[in-house]
Amino acid sequence: MGVRFPPPAVLKKKRKTLKTRTFKQGIHPEEFKELSENLAIQEAPLPPKVIIPLRQHIGAPLQPLVAKGDRVKTGQVIARADAFVSAPVHSSVTGMVKSVSNAASPLSASDTCIEIQTEEVEELDFDPAVVVDYQSLSTKQIIDSIRQAGIVGMGGAAFPTAVKFIPPEGVKIQTVVLNGCECEPFLTADHRLMLEAGENIVSGLKIIMKAVAAEKAIIGIETNKPDAIGKLTELCKDEPSIRVRAVKTKYPQGAEKMLIDAVLGIRVPPGKLPLHVGVVVSNVGTAAAVYEAVVKKIPLYKRVVTLSGDALSRPANLMVRIGTPFSFLFEHLGGFSKEVGKILMGGPMMGVAQFNPEVGVTKATSGILVVGKAKPRKEYNCINCAECVHNCPMFLVATKIARYARNDIWDKAEEYGALNCIECGCCSFVCPSNIPLVHWIRVAKNRIIEIKKEVKDKK
């Protein structure tokens, strides 16, 4: 007997069940999630010292509030934010301030950092027994709590969250989109957080909805996390204004504009922000931090970090104090299993390469990736294959922009949309000639912005 297929009606029903949403173009690199996706979050041990950079957010710099020799408590504000677009920084340990000086950070060779020698006995600058009914709070009180807690976007963007929740006058936020995609290969911190702290995430989402006066919310989760989809769906079954939507496992599904397109079918115009189409996007980790800040009055002084890669002896998902040196975490996990070729803060697509393993974890450190040494790839001339064009989620012609950047033709680079690039790395990933397209587009973006500033200053 031959194979018996189900009748057409059954097939049709099955296809409908499996249908998922996504955006146009993009790529599907190998995931490597299996290295850590089944590893529960563990509390990392207290490091002997923390090195806390003051630049952990997009926006204005901070003013340190402590000096060498000062004793600080866990959760104490150690650097204040005077500007609107900024976020204060808190001590992640109890101990003595050893220095306030320039040092290497994950984002710069030299940043103002506060080094604190950790004491064994911890003293908190907040009351862990506090529980606030957020329903009784005004929008201003909620946003003030978020601002005072120093929360920034924890998916990697690090934009001050309180600022994001204050739309310009006349703008109505209709929908909050919660990003549970975690589309970067290797990273599983958000996945584990959804499984282990889903209640906090949903509560944080409801607080965000109240803060921005949104009527509905959508949680987008990639299909490679069926357990997280199930968990959040169960938690939201009695929440008529919140829906969980499975989105296709594809990179960069977690980028704001891509996710909005996938779950709402709305395209954010070039040069515009999600708020211009009535949407606020927030990461699941940010939502959990919002819950802790508003309900428990706990500032952002630690976060979940995935440590993974083929050169790391033991991958893990760890709850890590901000400022913990990368080297301390490597030692805690048994060091390296092979010669290290590169250390990245973040994933392999958009991560920032690190030259100094002594730098400290920041609020935006979603992962630390350690990869083995590999043979350098030779760059060849462009063969006009158009792979970069076919895969760019922003529909840019990366080769044109890169060529203009190499030849200092900045007006043409801008004309071809350099400023619209989200630097996701799809073009570089698919390029058979190994051209560092993202590097050249980034060069173009920086120079165009500089020229615009120079012109503005002359007026």
Image (cartoon, rainbow, N blue to C red):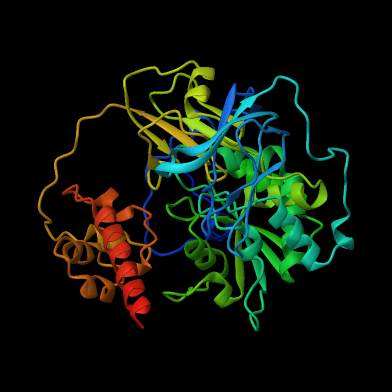
Give whichever of 369, 233 is nearer the camera.
369
**Above/below status of 354 relative to 59:** above
Image coordinates for residue 351, horizontal then vertical, percent: 40, 44
* Picture coordinates of residue 14, whole percent (x, y): 56, 55
Along the viewing direction, whichever of 367 and 121 lies nearer the viewer: 121
Q: Is residue 258 above or below residue 266?
A: above
Vertical placement of 104 versus 447: above or below?
above
Q: Quadrant of the N terminus?
A: top left
Is any part of residue 325 visible from this angle?
yes
- Residue at image point 66% right, 61% down: 162
Residue 395 seen in the figure: no
Report x, y in % for residue 284. 63, 50
- Residue 130: which quarter of the image? top right
Q: Residue at x 28, y 73 (%)?
A: 414
The C terminus lies in quadrant: bottom left
Residue 102, position as x, y percentages in the image: 46, 39
425 in relation to 347, above or below: below
Looking at the rendering, which quadrant does residue 409 occupy?
bottom left
Q: Residue at x 38, y 54 (%)?
A: 424
Q: Please give the name of the residue rendered at 81% of the width and 46% of the height, measured from the top-left corner.
A: 296
Q: Quadrant of residue 269?
A: bottom left
Q: Nearer the viewer, residue 144 or 413?
A: 144
Number of numbered discs? 0
